[in-house]
Amino acid sequence: MGVENAETPQFLVVVNTEEQYSVWFADRDLPLGWHAEGTRGTRQECLDHITRVWTDLRPRSVREHLAAHGG
């Protein structure tokens, strides 16, 4: 991770039940329906992580529906 100091806000990578990713301020309560994924850093570090891991942007329910119905 990058250099941290008191002026650099820290963020978390968060995920919802549809396996959609976002960033959230580390010092704030998480919004309902989201949980911390485990990555913490600057906003850009978190965004870079999301770019690496979130390769299928379709919500989980859509992926499961298509898989079940031959889509």
Image (cartoon, rainbow, N blue to C red):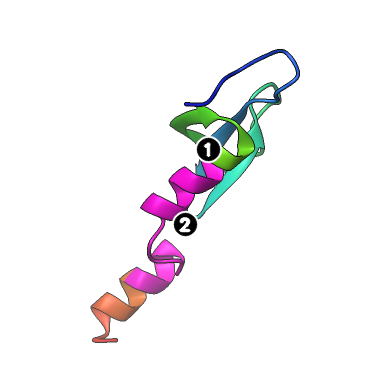
Relative depth, front residue between 46 and 3: 3
Please identify the quadrant where the C terminus is shown: bottom left
Residue under the image location 39 percent in, 66 percent down: 56
Q: Is residue 34 visible?
A: no
Relative depth, front residue between 22 and 29: 22
Residue under the image location 62 percent in, 38 percent down: 43
Cα separation, mark 2 vs mark 1, equals 22 Å
How crowded pointer 2 is (Cα within 10 Å; few <14, some 14-19, many 20+) is rated as: some
Q: Secondary structure at mark 1?
A: helix
Give residue 7's position: percent from left, percent from top: 76, 19
Relative depth, front residue between 61 and 11: 11
Q: Secondary structure at mark 2?
A: loop
Dot 2 or dot 1: first in sequence order is 2
Give residue 69's position: percent from left, percent from top: 27, 84
How crowded pointer 1 is (Cα within 10 Å; few <14, some 14-19, many 20+) is rated as: some
Q: Tag 2: residue type?
A: Glu
User: Pointer 1: what residue?
Assistant: 45
Q: Is residue 8 above or below residue 58?
A: above
User: Pointer 2: what residue?
Assistant: 18
Horizontal side, residue 66 vs residue 25: left or right: left
Relative depth, front residue between 29 and 43: 43
Q: Tag 1: residue type?
A: Glu
Residue under the image location 46 percent in, 54 percent down: 51
Give residue 4's position: percent from left, percent from top: 60, 18
